[in-house]
Amino acid sequence: MSQRTLSSAPVQPHLADTMTRRAALKRAALFLGVALTPSLIANVLQAAAVPGAKALFLSSAQLDLVTAIAERILPRTDTPGASDVGVPAFVDLMLGKYSTESERQVFTAGLDEVNAASLAAHAQSFVKVSAEQQDAILMRIAVASQKKDKTFFHQIKELTVVGYFTSEIVGRTVLHYDPVPGRFQGCVPISEVGNVLWTK
């Protein structure tokens, strides 16, 4: 194969976009300590959810619980939180359309476990206790999930991270993705690019 073929063969736009999204997913997951399964990567490249979308699989109460948990995993700070970018709708879409029945059962049982832990510790449902109390409950569940495979905590963390970093809002406002970039300049003063770091 010639050098020209290797260096100048055109890349189909949709394939380039898929490769870019897949690479971004893996890097974000690695940064946040999430192991993505190949099937999830393949499915998420086809899926898209938006804030406020109607639930396909979860009940209203379950969706509220997912929203509260996702918001503790990626809370709103100076960047959008998980619920701001449609993560709960994404989780519901992935469960309802792309997950197996056994995966759904593990997930719904995990939601019940989270609520039961909150009721036992605070006599209130998870969505009604304080953020600090929610964090403590999730930490106990996370510790119990260590050295285990395919637990609820692995599912919710994985889906939250993937849903967040594949959302359009995060791409534009957090990662500062530019779909039509201009000329590359490798070394410029940060003041000339809006004082914004893409890794902020």
Image: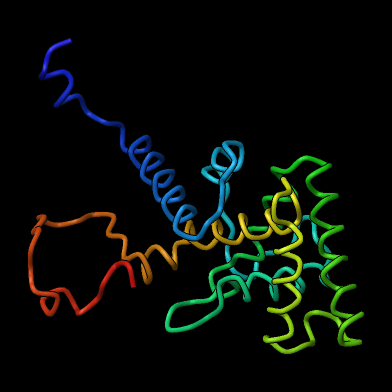
Q: Quick one: 28 or 15, which is closer to the camera?
A: 28
Q: Quadrant of the N terminus?
A: top left
Q: Residue at x 29, y 67 (%)?
A: 198
Q: Residue at x 72, y 80 (%)?
A: 134
Going by the image, does 92 lie left or right of 86?
right
- Give percent across and percent down for residue 82: 57, 71
Q: Quick one: 40 or 98, which is closer to the camera?
A: 40
- Residue 141 image-quadrant placement: bottom right
Q: Residue at x 46, y 50 (%)?
A: 25
Q: Quadrant of the C terminus?
A: bottom left
Residue 18 position (above or below residue 3): below
- Give percent across and percent down for residue 13: 31, 38
Q: Quick one: 28 or 100, which is closer to the camera?
A: 28
Residue 38 position (above or below residue 192): above
- Give percent across and percent down for residue 77: 48, 83
- Residue 52 image-quadrant placement: bottom right
Q: In the rendered view, how is the structure colored?
A: rainbow
Q: Quick one: 144 or 194, which is closer to the camera?
A: 144
Number of marks in picture: 0
- Residue 137 image-quadrant placement: bottom right
Q: Residue at x 23, y 54 (%)?
A: 180
Going by the image, does 56 lie left or right of 5?
right
Going by the image, does 103 lie left or right of 8?
right
- Give percent across and percent down for residue 29: 49, 54
